[in-house]
């Protein structure tokens, strides 16, 4: 199926409609009992979801094609064996998927471009099976950044060089030199808009810190003013003006054990997204993931209340308020949340260790797009000209499936024509930046 046909199918959700109830669609069945609580989901530029998990020490990566999950690796179907831990990311600029994983003899890195390339290996003694390695991608410059731990608790920082097909060390974060037992207390993500690597961490009895790496050196970004024992942290980035860095975390202090979400701004200051709530006891409620919708900038986060049975929560933040998404997945444990380029949300869960994947199509989260979007366009699909109607003046940009801007035009309040005759057939993001810097996005198909 080509890009245009995919967008035509999903474009049915584009017209301004009244409120919709969300629909959880399970993608495939028959997954194994993975015997653990870690799996990841990413997607490529065609919004094809990929799931990664370890089954009986075998590294499995599958993609959802024509209604079923198929292995990305040739027979015997797994990428590698004796795998302890992994991380996986997708580069939307070159449409390749990167996999980092730990084995007893070191760290391995591989690239998927229709098939898996040969592995690059860093010799090391690695026996930890929890958060032994983390991966982040500078997509524009195609630089994978990694952090990994050896058995002696030594922490290593490196980046991959595709010219030399090898890893190069980068400066270490001096305040974070020992993983302690596991790597629950850290996250490692690249902010594509700012061109900086972000690292959130908490070590020993120190406060939570966030640092940024500009390719040369680390700089302090944020530090709690009071002691907090972190248990989980997840980073995500909300683009626009102003852009923000979102941190979902668990922590404890003298008053109890807490869950909370905050938004931090590069110029300083913060905003409470999810007011911290007392989870009752240590590890009773744990954050599990966070993601930003590239179409409308909504921010989703998941956490699990470890009662009996487990009670999982899915929440999202629209930019002004937070909402709970109702579902019928009581007893599941949420493992990961992800948005594809078309704004569809994916949930990765386990139920008694059996893996499940669900999708919620864009604009079915119980929010009226008409009430939230300061513009509309028609027809959709369009051919040579698009009628663009805005409630205020601003700048319209069209972005293709490879993340490249292909059109920019100043627009006034009211209705005006936009010439799209030079655009190739396919699916695009329409990005409207208002005069006060706010940004809204939606999808459009060009025939």
Image (cartoon, rainbow, N blue to C red):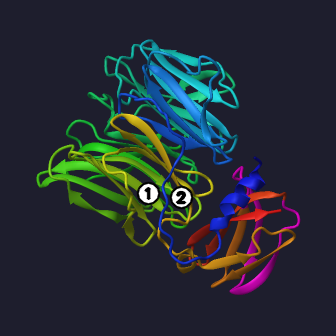
State the SS at label 1: strand
Q: CA distance from mark 1 to mark 2?
A: 8 Å
Residue 124 image point, x, y percent: 44, 14
Is residue 225 shown left or right of residue 2? left
Query: For the view shown, which residue lies furthest in the left direction?
Result: 254
The residue shown at (53%, 63%) is 297
What segment is highlighted magenta in the picture?
A: 399-423
Q: Are marks 1 and 2 in contact (CB under 8 Å)?
A: yes
At x 53%, y 34%, the residue is 145
**Extreme residue in the front direction:** 30
Q: Which residue is mark 2?
A: 293
In magenta stretch: residue 404: yes
CA neighbours of label 2 inside 10 A, class few (<14), some (14 to 19), many (20+): many
Q: Helix, strand, or loop for circle 2?
A: loop
Left or right of 134 in this view: 28: right
* Residue 298 in picture, x, y percent from top left: 49, 63
Residue 161 falls left or right of residue 55: right
The foreground one among 1 and 121 is 1
Task: Give percent across and percent down for residue 31.
Answer: 48, 33
Q: Which mark is residue 300?
A: 1
Q: Is residue 187 above or below residue 359?
A: above
Q: Percent from the top left, x then y, of residue 10? A: 66, 59
- 1 or 2: tag closer to the N-terminus: 2
Q: Residue at 83% across / 62% down in the picture?
A: 447
Q: Quadrant of residue 277?
A: bottom left
Label 1, residues with CA under 10 Å away: few <14, some 14-19, many ≥20: many
Residue 99 sits in which quadrant? top right
Q: Check residue 116 in the rendering and tell me which mark sits there, or answer none.
A: none
The residue lying toward the viewer, choosing from 107 and 1, is 1
Q: Can the viewer see residue 411 in this picture?
A: yes
Is residue 169 in sight in this rendering? no
């Amino acid at each position: 199926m080509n890009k245009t046909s995919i967008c035509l199918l999903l474009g049915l959700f584009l017209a301004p409609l009244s409120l919709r109830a969300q629909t959880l669609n399970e993608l495939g069945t028959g997954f194994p009992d993975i015997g653990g609580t870690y799996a990841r989901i990413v997607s490529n530029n065609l919004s094809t979801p990929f799931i990664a998990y370890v089954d009986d020490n075998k590294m499995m990566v599958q993609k959802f094609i024509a209604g079923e999950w198929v292995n990305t690796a040739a027979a015997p179907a797994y990428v590698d064996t004796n795998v302890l831990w992994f991380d996986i990311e997708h580069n939307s600029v070159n449409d390749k998927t990167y996999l980092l994983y730990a084995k007893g003899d070191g760290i391995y890195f591989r690239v998927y471009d229709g098939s898996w390339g040969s592995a690059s290996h860093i010799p090391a003694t690695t026996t930890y099976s929890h958060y032994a390695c983390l991966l982040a991608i500078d997509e524009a410059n195609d630089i994978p950044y990694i952090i990994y731990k050896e058995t002696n608790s030594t922490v290593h920082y490196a980046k991959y060089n595709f010219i030399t097909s090898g890893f190069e060390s980068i400066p270490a974060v001096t305040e974070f030199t020992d993983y302690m037992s596991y790597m629950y207390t850290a996250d490692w993500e690249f902010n594509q808009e700012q061109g900086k690597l972000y690292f959130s961490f908490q070590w020993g009895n120190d406060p939570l810190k966030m640092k940024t790496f500009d390719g040369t050196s680390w700089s302090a970004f944020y530090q709690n003013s009071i002691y907090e024992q972190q248990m989980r942290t997840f980073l995500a980035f909300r683009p626009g003006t102003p852009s923000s860095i979102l941190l979902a975390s668990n922590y404890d202090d003298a008053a109890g054990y807490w869950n909370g979400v905050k938004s931090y701004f590069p110029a300083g200051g913060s905003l409470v997204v999810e007011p911290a709530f007392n989870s009752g006891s240590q590890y009773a409620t744990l954050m599990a993931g966070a993601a930003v919708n590239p179409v409308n900038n909504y921010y989703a986060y998941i956490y699990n209340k470890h009662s009996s049975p487990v009670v999982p929560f899915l929440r999202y933040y629209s930019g002004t308020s937070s909402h709970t998404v109702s579902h019928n997945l009581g007893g599941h444990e949420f493992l990961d949340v992800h948005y594809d380029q078309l704004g569809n949300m994916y949930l990765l869960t386990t139920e008694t260790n059996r893996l499940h994947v669900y999708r919620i199509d864009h604009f079915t989260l119980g929010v009226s797009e008409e009430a939230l979007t300061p513009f509309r366009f028609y027809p959709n699909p369009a051919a040579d000209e698009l009628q663009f109607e805005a409630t205020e003046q601003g700048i319209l940009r069209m972005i293709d499936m490879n993340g490249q801007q292909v059109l920019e035009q100043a627009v006034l309040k009211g209705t005006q024509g936009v010439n799209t005759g030079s655009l190739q057939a396919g699916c695009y993001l329409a990005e409207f930046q208002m005069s006060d810097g706010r940004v809204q996005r939606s999808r459009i198909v060009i025939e």
